[in-house]
Amino acid sequence: MPVTRQGTNDAMTQESIQTMIDRAIQRNYNHTQDDASQSLGGGLRRLVQPARHRTAMIHRRDDIPKEDMPPRRRFVFTAPSPGCDVAESSATAARAPREDVGYVRALQASERRMMTSIEEVNLKISYQAQVHRQESNYFYTQLHDAQTDHIDIRLKIDVVRGQRTAYETEL
């Protein structure tokens, strides 16, 4: 009995398994974008906006420690001017590292969902392989039984022919 998907009678094929994998990847990709958008509070568009007039803000706002800046502004404020030597300040070195921001958690959640989807696909494939092995064993058992029955029937036919020959000889 072939393995079927729920709600259909189609046997699972290489194409259907590949389709399931593609759908799982697409679903996880969409969740990743949604989670990242929510964690940034305004969408992914803020990540790709041009810097505009922020170069002037670099010199005025360089006293803000990197840990206190939001992730989307961190690199804009801390970019060194050309020709400047950059060294870590003692205040920054003494400060404890801050917890990861929301988009990192969103990416980690997406990775967990993707791994769960991959594990589900692996389980389905393992189940399909197990059912295939069981069906193969059942088929070979039936084949062996049929061959044994065939040999037994041949022997009985030979015995009956011998008895018939003996009966005809007596008459």
Image (tube, helix red, strand yellow):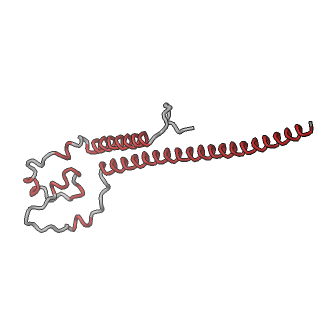
Quadrant of residue 65 within the rendered picture? bottom left
The C terminus: image quadrant: top right
Question: Residue furthest toward the right?
Answer: 170
Q: How many labels does the image show?
A: 0
From the viewer's side, name the closer residue of 51 and 111. 111
From the viewer's side, name the closer residue of 136 and 5. 136
Q: Which residue is drawn at 88% across and 41% down?
A: 166
Q: Which residue is drawn at 92% across and 39% down?
A: 170
Q: Which residue is drawn at 88% across and 37% down?
A: 168
From the viewer's side, name the closer residue of 166 and 122. 166
Q: Which residue is drawn at 9% across and 66% down?
A: 84
Quadrant of residue 159 within the rendered picture? top right
Q: Is residue 91 left or right of residue 62?
A: right
The image position of residue 88, as x and y in percent, is 20, 67
Q: In this view, does 67 lie to the left or right of 120?
A: left
The image position of residue 109, as x and y in percent, is 37, 48
Relative to 19, residue 61 above or below? below
Q: Is residue 162 left or right of residue 150?
A: right
The image position of residue 160, as x and y in percent, is 82, 39
The N terminus: image quadrant: top right
The image position of residue 134, as x and y in percent, is 60, 45
